[in-house]
Amino acid sequence: MSVRPCVLLLVILPLMSTKLINDENLRRFIVRFHNKIRGQERAADMMKLSWSVQLAKEADQWAHKCVFEHAMTARGQNLGLISDPGSVKYNIGRMMQLWVEEKKEYNPRKKGCNSSCHYTQLVWAKTTHVGCSIHLCDNFGTSKRFTRNYMFFVCFYSPRGNIGDHLFTPGKHCSKCPEKSHRCNHGLCQGHCYDHFKKCRRLAAKGKCLTDVAFMEFSCTKSCRLC
């Protein structure tokens, strides 16, 4: 399936780097935006999304390549190009809103889109985690049309969507939540939020959520504020 880049064609100002996604408020903004859109669907089994530091790192690595192509990975992916002098939060919000507006391209019978399909990953019911990055590309390698000074916004998702199936099960909110995810939070299925080890709070205070992602993300979910 071909992917058409979403682009805001305005004047660019070089005002951000990938490190800004480490900002807690910005991470919450991205997650809340996703969950708001997911909660608006009449879905019986829509999972609530949480931020993944590991996915954000993978998205950051891909954003640095400055190539508008999907990575060959098992992750779900949404990509966007931004050329706008607005704030970081404004630009990211505008990009995600463009993904939402692609809903009109979705054909339920074909289980696919006529063109761009970023919307489908946004509302893929089984997806539980998202991580994003944004990077200023001095030279952008997608075509002659996009050459210099574009912000490349990348979000990775797990489990991935867009696999030729229905987006979600239609029905009353939370009426068909997966096992162990029966809590209903604003129309979204959510599992219990807890740590698996007593030392998680101490480890999180030492910064292990960022330095030992593979262990902390799944063992100290609550202390790392990932749920």
Image (tube, grey):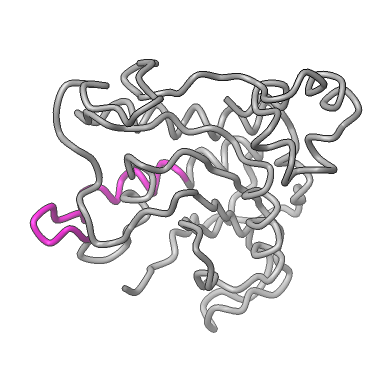
Q: Position of residue 87 (x, y in %)?
A: 65, 38
- Report the side of 69 relative to 166 (left or right): right
Above or below, 225 relative to 85 = above
Q: Where is residue 70 in the image (x, y as percent from the top left)?
A: 50, 69
Is 81 magenta? The answer is: no
Question: For the magenta stretch, what is the residue range?
Answer: 96-112
Q: Position of residue 208 (x, y in %)?
A: 84, 35
Q: In the orientation shown, which residue stands out farthest toward the front?
A: 197
Above or below, 85 relative to 112 = above
Q: In the orientation shown, which residue stands out farthest toward the left?
A: 109
Quarter of the figure with residue 150: bottom right
Which residue lies at the image location 54% right of the left edge and 32% below the top edge? 50
Residue in the foreground of this view, choosing between 171 and 35: 171
Q: In the orientation shown, which residue stands out farthest toward the right?
A: 206
Which residue lies at the image location 75% right of the left edge and 48% below the top edge? 16
Is 108 magenta? The answer is: yes
